Image (cartoon, grey):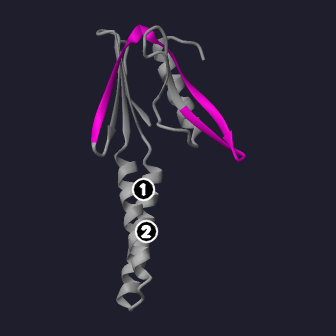
Amino acid sequence: MGVIQNSETRFEASIRSWLAGFLLSVFGVLFTALGVAALGAGEAQGGIFVAVGLGMIGLGVWLLSRRTHILLDRETGTATIRFARLFGRRDLTLPLASITRAQVLRRRTSGNRLYKLVLQVSGDEQAGPHSLTGGYSSGGWRKGRMARAINAWLGVED
C-alpha cells in the first residue's frame, strides 16, 4: 500500500495485500513437500497433504495477484479505481467532484479490530462507500495513513 505520485494535479496509489498471499504460498509449498515425501514413503495420506498444499498455493497466488490502483486527476476531473485480479480487471471511473473523502471503517469481530479503506462517493447513482481494500482486515495504521494522504490531496480535513 503506497503512494506512487502525489502532485498538485494528480494522485496515484497502489494497494496490494501481499503478506497473506506470500504466507499461504510458503506454507502451501511446505505442505506439498511433506505430502510428496509421505507419498514417496508409501503413505497414502500424503495425497491429502499434497491436495491441501496445492490449494494453499493456488489461494496464495490469487491473493498475490489482487491489487487496487487509484488515480485521482484534477486535469480530467476523474477518479479511476482499477481492481486487478488473477483473471482480469475492472475499472470504475467516477467524477472527481463526487468523491467526498477517504475513510477507514472499523469493525470488531471476536475481540479483534478489523479495518477497511473506502472512498465515500456522493451525488450520483454510485453514491456510497467504495472499498479500496476488498474486505475488512488488520492493518489499520497503513489504511489510516493512505486515507490521510488521499484526504490531504482532496483538501478534506480528517
Residue on which the image places disc 1: 22
Classify residue 140 as left or right of residue 120.
Answer: right
Give yes or no for residue 113 being in the magenta stretch. Answer: yes
Q: Main secondary structure of the magenta part?
A: strand
Q: Earlier in the sequence, mark 2 or mark 1?
A: 1
Q: Residue furthest bottom?
A: 42
What's the distance in space between the residues labelled 2 and 1, CA to CA? 16 Å
Q: Which residue is mark 2?
A: 52
The spot of residue 33 in percent (x, y) is: 38, 76
| Boundaries of the magenta span | 88-116
Q: Amino acid at mark 2?
A: Val
SS for tag 2? helix
Residue at left offset 42%, top offset 48%: 18
- Amino acid, disc 1: Phe
Indicate which disc residue 140 carries.
Answer: none
Q: Quadrant of the N terminus?
A: top left
Foreground disc of the pair 2, 1: 2
Which type of secondary structure does the marked residue at label 1 adopt? helix
Residue 86 position, x and y percent, is 30, 46
Nearest the viewer among 126 and 135 is 126
2 or 104: which is nearer to us?
Answer: 104
* In magenta segment, residue 57: no
In the image, taking residue 134 as reference, residue 92 lies left or right, namely: left
